Structure formats: C-alpha cells, structure tokens
Image: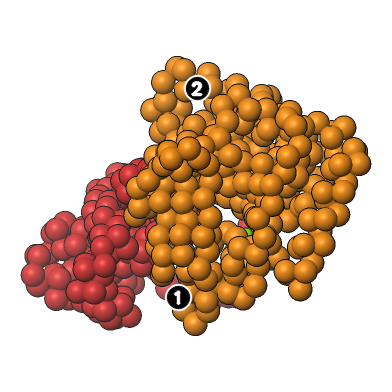
Chain colours: A orange, B red
C-alpha cells in the first residue's frame, strides 16, 4: 500500500494454450502481508494464473511483477504448493520437505530442524521416514505445504492445497496455515473452490471466471484474526458466505 | 520351510523332463549321436570341469560378455543422456540411431571380425554394439518420460538444471534404464557366442562349434547348459539390482514376491 512496491502486481495478463484463450486482461495487486483467495470454476484458469505468477509459464500478454521486478522465470522469493502433491517418489517425506535446501545431505542443521518442526506443524510428526507411496493423498499434500514453508518465500502461492483432504482435516489445516502465516504475515495467493475456506483465510477474495477468465469480483473480508472454527459458526460469517455465493453464481453463470 | 516347499514344483517338472529324456534316448529310443541321454551329458559336463578344459572357454566368454556389456552400457546411457537433454544432439543423431536400431547387429559379426581380429577385441566390440541400442533407446525414453509436473515443481524452487537432472529426471528414468540393462545382459551373451561361432579359438561358443565338427553332441549340450547358467546368473544379478535401485516402485504394503 502506502506507495511501496507491492509484493505482487499482475497487470493486463493474458494467456493462451494453442487454440485456446485461457486468461484475458487479468489485473490485480497483492499488498504486503495480504492474504488473497481466488475462487473460480473448475478449468477456469486458476492454476494457469499461479504458474504465470511463479514464472513457470510466460504470459502471452501483459506482465507479472514480483517485488517490483518483472517475472522472467522462477524466483527464490516465491514458493508454491501445487494442486497435485508432486513429491519425488524416491525420497522420504523429510527429504521431500528439504528439497528446497538440497535434501538432507545439502541442508544445514537448522534447516533439518526446521523441516522436522514443519512436519509436526502440518500434523505429520511420524511420517518423516515414509516414502510418498506410503502416504495418503492428504498426507502427501501436507508434505508439499511443509516444503513450501521450508523454502520460506516472501510470496506464497497455494493451488487448492487442501482439496484432497477430508472436511475436518481440511479445516484444521486451514487454521494451521493461518497460524504459520500469522507468525510471519506475507503476501499470499490461495486458490480454492471452497467459499468457507476462502472466508476463513483471506483478507480479500477475487472471483476469476469466464471464457477467457477475468477477475469478476474483488471482495474484502473484514473478519478479525485469528479466525477460529467458532468464527465459521457466527452469523457474520454465514452472511458473508451467502453473499459471496450469490456473487459467484452471478458472475460464473 | 516355505521356500523349500516353493522349490518343489519346479523340481518335480525337472525330474519328469529328465525321466522322459532318459526314456527317449534309451536302447529303443533315439541314437546317441543325435540326442545323448542325460547321463552322457552329465558325464561330458563333469569331465570338462574335472579335467579343467572348460574353464578357459568359460573365462573367455565371460570376459568378452562382461567387458563388452560394460562398455556398451556406459556408452548407451551417456549417449542417451546427451540425446535426451540436448535438442541439437538429438536433431543430428537421433534419426540414425532409429535407423541403426532396426538393423540386426549380429549381421555385422563377420565384418567386425575382419576389422578387429579373431581375438577378444572383436567379441568385445560385437557385444558392446549389440547391447548398446536397446539401452540407448530405453534411456532416451526414460528421461523423456520424467513427470513434467515434478520438473516444474523443482524449477519453482529455483533448483538448477543439474539438480533437476540428477534428482528428478535420472531417477525417473531408472526403471527404463534398468529394463534396458536387463535386455542387454541377455543380448551381450548372444553377441559373445555369435562372435565365437564366426571365428575364434576359444570360448563356450567355440566349444560348441568345434564339438559340432566332431559330432560330439554331449559336449554341445554341456556348452548350451553352461551358457544357460551364465545367462540366468547375469539376469538374476541385474534383477536383484533392479529391485534394490528402484525400490520405490515396489508395492511396499504387499508381501515380497515368492520367487525361487
Ligand atoms: N498444458 C496444457 N495444455 C493445453 N491446455 C491446458 C494445459 N493446462 C491446462 N490447460 C487448459 O487450460 C484451462 C485452464 O486450466 P487450469 O488448470 O488453469 O484450470 P483451473 O482453474 O486450475 O481448474 P481446476 O479448478 O480444475 O484446477 C483448462 O481448460 C485446461 O484444459
Ligand atoms: Mg487448478
């Protein structure tokens, strides 16, 4: 805000796969310490947008700036949790968390300790030595979350990180994520299908839809933090969810 | 106890085959210059090992097989890496690899013998050439088949291309490479024996060839049995290696496969 360079600025971004325009003229900024959720229909281009921001794909129009610099490729200060677990099958869970540090052998003592701490934080205290084939989908996804947090980026990108989890674990993980984020608030873009999850976590909700997709709505969520399970039961939360649902149905129709 | 029990059925089969063989070659059966009985073959095997006359042949065949296999395999993996990782290399070389892959390399055996002489060198070259191509193609396919999403993930964490090659692409290609090594070890032995058939004064292939000239069918059988044992041993070693190296592909929850 206040005249500073925003951690993320997306301006006029368009993207097309061969024969198919996915995104058109997408523009938004994320302020320092702001948690932004992106809601949108399946196949709408949310993952594509995150890959553009991560520098994994070049936009066909417009530009993405991270910390004021135009993104030309993956950056060290950006970390991503992918929609699929994307773990190396030949590495243990702990080694997978330590991938950004060069695995256990390349990592410092402090990094290994931090990785173990993060495994506990995401609820996998006993999974360090397990291989991905021995993890459930939800456990694998939590390893992916721990890996991104070990990387300790200034800009967090999360692509439906909890979609594979059961409803209860999902809510618990959202609260864990909130805690980890509150410990060091930073810019975050969180893609989700779930309106309650977006409201639980986000300072702002963007709705991305249409063919090609654009930002159709930009909502502020003024609920106090830390938000708790009880927050979700409150009337204010439910009214917001309902209103957001109406907006979503309207623009995504 | 269980293992012994598992061994029983194949042993019963073996007994039945030996029995039938024995009957077929008895006084009323086939003449021994066409098909010697199991006892005769056994005597030929025993005699060849007891008087030490088999050992130099076995040593020669093993040497050419293993040296040629090692050279061909290392060459194939390194070339495969270059082709899979370098667009330029691929465009210049790949069409020829595909073309040569289709040609039967054993047909080159006489030419190779002319070029490299009748000794060990020509056998090594033939073996290397024969096991080179299947492994090369497997290496290329294996590296190319590496999960794009895993590569993208590693890129997103700013991992270097070398890191991505070593820790993402190469392990992803390991099953295909080991498959190529498995095919290669069998082909290597074939290459060595063909080389010895064409021209050699040593080796198990030579042993079989010269026994043919003398109509010593028992020794021919002994040679074939020796080659089979070498082939099976090589195959099992590569298989054991395979299980150790690509452990993550095994279903860890399932009980280990009951093999003999
Ligand atoms: N590699 C690709 N090549 C061609 N088209 C692609 C590719 N990846 C995605 N697409 C197309 O781009 C569109 C957007 O895909 P994207 O994965 O961004 O959607 P999404 O919003 O993340 O969907 P979901 O919520 O289901 O994950 C889809 O229609 C998809 O078919
Ligand atoms: Mg997606």
Q: Chain of mark 1?
A: B
Q: Residue at x 91, y 41 (%)?
A: A235
Residue at left offset 81%, top offset 31%:
A228
Task: Determine which quarter of the picture holds residue B109.
Answer: bottom left
Q: x, y percentage for residue A96?
A: 53, 37
Say what secondary structure mark 2 lies in: helix
On screen, residue A106 above or below B72: above
Q: Position of residue B58 (x, y in %)?
A: 30, 51
- Which residue is found at the position 42% from the left and 56% from the top? A64
Mark drawn on residue B34: 1
Q: Could you say where residue B208 lies in the image, as x and y percent from the top left?
A: 32, 65
Q: Is residue A205 visible?
A: yes
Distance between the alpha carbons at the discs numbered 1 and 2: 71 Å
Which disc number belongs to residue A112? 2
A145 or B256: nearer the eye?
Answer: A145
Left or right: A67, with A249 as reference point: left
């Amino acid at each position: 805000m206040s005249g500073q360079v925003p951690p993320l600025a997306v301006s006029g971004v368009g993207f097309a796969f061969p024969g198919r325009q996915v995104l058109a003229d997408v523009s938004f900024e994320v302020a320092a310490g702001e948690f932004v959720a992106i809601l949108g229909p399946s196949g709408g281009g949310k993952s594509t947008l995150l890959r553009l921001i991560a520098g994994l794909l070049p936009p066909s129009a417009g530009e993405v700036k991270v910390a004021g610099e135009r993104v030309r490729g993956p950056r060290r200060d950006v970390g991503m949790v992918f929609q699929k677990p994307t773990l190396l099958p030949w590495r243990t869970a702990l080694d997978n968390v330590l991938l950004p540090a060069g695995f256990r052998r390349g990592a410092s003592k402090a990094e290994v300790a931090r990785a173990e701490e993060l495994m506990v934080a995401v609820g996998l205290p006993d999974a360090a030595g397990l291989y991905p084939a021995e993890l459930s989908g939800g456990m694998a996804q939590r390893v992916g979350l721990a890996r991104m947090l070990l990387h300790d980026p200034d800009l967090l990108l999360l692509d439906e990180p909890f979609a594979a989890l059961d409803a209860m674990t999902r809510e618990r993980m959202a609260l864990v994520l909130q805690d980890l984020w509150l410990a060091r608030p930073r810019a975050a873009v969180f893609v989700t299908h779930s309106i309650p999850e977006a409201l639980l976590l986000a300072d702002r909700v963007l709705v991305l839809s249409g063919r090609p997709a654009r930002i159709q709505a930009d909502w502020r969520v003024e609920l106090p933090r830390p938000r708790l399970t009880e927050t979700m039961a409150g009337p204010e939360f439910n009214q917001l969810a309902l209103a957001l649902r109406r907006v979503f149905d309207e623009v995504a129709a | 106890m269980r293992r012994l029990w598992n061994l029983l059925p194949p042993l019963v089969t073996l007994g039945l085959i030996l029995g039938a063989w024995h009957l077929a070659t008895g006084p009323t059966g086939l003449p021994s210059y066409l098909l010697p009985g199991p006892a005769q073959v056994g005597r030929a095997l025993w005699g060849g090992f007891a008087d030490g006359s088999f050992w130099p042949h076995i040593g020669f065949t093993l040497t050419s097989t293993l040296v040629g296999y090692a050279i061909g395999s290392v060459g194939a993996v390194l070339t495969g890496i270059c082709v899979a990782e370098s667009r330029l290399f691929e465009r210049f070389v790949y069409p020829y690899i595909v073309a040569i892959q289709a040609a039967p390399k054993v047909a080159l055996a006489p030419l190779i013998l002319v070029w490299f002489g009748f000794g060990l060198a020509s056998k090594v070259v033939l073996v290397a050439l024969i096991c080179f191509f299947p492994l090369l193609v497997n290496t290329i396919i294996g590296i190319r088949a590496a999960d794009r999403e895993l590569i993208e993930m590693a890129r997103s964490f700013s991992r270097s291309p070398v890191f991505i090659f070593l820790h993402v692409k190469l392990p992803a290609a390991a099953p295909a490479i080991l498959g190529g090594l498995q095919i290669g070890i069998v082909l290597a032995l074939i290459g060595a024996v063909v080389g010895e058939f064409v021209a050699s004064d040593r080796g198990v292939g030579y042993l079989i060839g010269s026994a043919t000239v003398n109509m010593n069918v028992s020794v021919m059988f002994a040679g074939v049995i020796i080659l089979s044992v070498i082939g099976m041993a090589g195959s099992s070693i590569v298989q054991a290696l395979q299980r150790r190296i690509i452990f993550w592909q095994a279903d860890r929850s399932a009980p280990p496969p009951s093999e003999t």
